[in-house]
Amino acid sequence: MTISPDDDFAAAEYALGTLDPSERATLAARRLREPELDEAIRAWEELLAPLAEVAPEIEPPRDLLPAIEARIRGASPEAPENGAIVALERSIRRWRAAAIAASIIAGVLAIGFVARETSRRSAPHEYVAILQKDAASPAFAVTVNLDKQELTVRPVAAQAPPGKSYELWIIDAKLGARSLGVIGDKSRGASLSAYDPAVVEGATYAVTVEPPGGSPTGQPSGAPVFVGKLIPVGP
Amino acid sequence: MTIRGGAPGDRGPAGAGDDLADLLSRIAARDAAAFAALYKQTSAKLYGVVARILTRGDVAADVLQEAYVRIWEKAGEFDPLKGSPLAWMATIARNRALDEVRRVRPLSLEDQPEGFEPAAEEIDPLAARERSEGLAALVDCLKALDEEKRAVVLLAYYRGLSREALAKRFGRPVPTIKTWLHRSLAQLRDCLAS
């Protein structure tokens, strides 16, 4: 199976870098869940990559390596002069701890889903998506009832950075990214009646970091931080 | 770039002569000395890629940091059959730079210069004397494009110019630039496949 010519051109422009911000954010979310699109982007990246060989060198600022080494060790630099870096390291460590806790919660959730699946074999058209950055860090649980055209999003282990909001998007190859609203600390619902059930079922769901109250432009401000696709719950 | 064989373990301390592919395989095994050696050998190259796209030095430095953190995390995914180690690393760094420059923000990066001027020269791979096999093939195919269309692709690649910026620069409507990009990229792929 191959991707559509439109997606192929989008993949080419993604690799070259000429997509506009919302197109780029949309494709960044889709590639995480659409292996063929991801493969197409990689192929274009590999095609263009030899060009980088001839970009003349520019000496980077001198003090970067210790900061990078500190980040990959997850520890502070040996002689921290910069309070901001130390604070960042701390918040990364906290995030790691939260991610570990989240994976435990996810395990419990998964057991819950299996239990529900077996006890409610007759319940059709229910779907769930765990939005995550990677396998170890689930952040939001999205449930969709296709009959009622309702969506519920529940934070599992995610808290928006200070002064920022998380916003949920439904992303489809044709529609692009459409907002489903800002996500607070608690579980909240959203109507999906504006969308075709086939779109709801096949779409990518993504969360971006936005200014307080959500994106000012109605489009994602950057690449998604958490993404997922729906899987059916029930028979 | 040649890729030499050899098991990751049978080399001495990381030094300037180490092959990049070997360094990446040692980094995949969490060898911090290999990472420092890789940074030493490649950081000016990768900074040369990101600093031409990001016009603010502090942002470019942040992006370079993030790129190396990703290289550390993803070193095990490097596949020598799909390109050189440097091309693989440059793709990671360039993608991070593009994510940054294509972020929707109230003020664009270009509106807030901080006295940082990355090298403004045009980069012409056609004039490069030393070329890897991969670059030589790509250059042959770039030569087959019209000069103007080739310039559009190269400016997009090296400077991270958007369709709008390219349209302004070449005095053409945005849809024309988009059509050029699609045709040029398709032509390059067909040429490389033949």
Image (cartoon, rainbow, N blue to C red):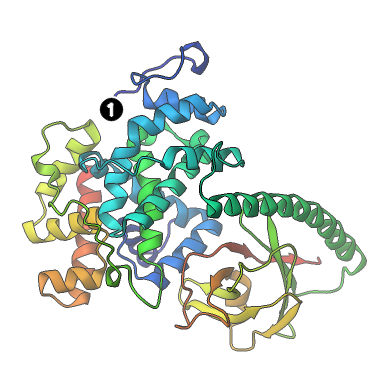
Q: Quadrant of the N terminus of chain B?
A: top left
Quarter holding residue B134:
top left
Q: State the residue at coordinates (37%, 33%).
A: B85
Q: State the residue at coordinates (83%, 62%).
A: A113
Going by the image, does A220 lie left or right of A206?
left
Number of marks in the rendered image? 1
Q: Secondary structure at mark 1?
A: loop
Nearest the viewer among A1 and A189 is A189
Quarter holding residue B163:
bottom left
Residue A93, given in percent of the width and then of the height, sits at 67, 49
* Kind of residue indicated by mark 1: Met
Residue B171, given in percent of the width and then of the height, sits at 10, 74
Residue A215, given in percent of the width and then of the height, sits at 50, 80
Tell me, yes or no, if residue A127 can be seen here: yes
Going by the image, does B125 lie left or right of A31?
left
> What residue is shown with label 1?
B1
Going by the image, does B91 lie left or right of A154?
left
Residue A5, given in percent of the width and then of the height, sits at 35, 64
Residue B182 position (above or below residue A96): below
Residue furthest right as drawn: A119
Q: Quadrant of the C terminus of chain B?
A: top left
Q: State the residue at coordinates (64%, 88%).
A: A193
Tell me, yes or no, if residue B186 can be seen here: no
Q: Residues within 10 Å of mark 1 (few under 14, many from 20)?
A: some
Nearest the viewer among A17 and A162 is A162
The answer for which chain carries disc 1 is: B
Residue A215 position (above or below residue B68): below
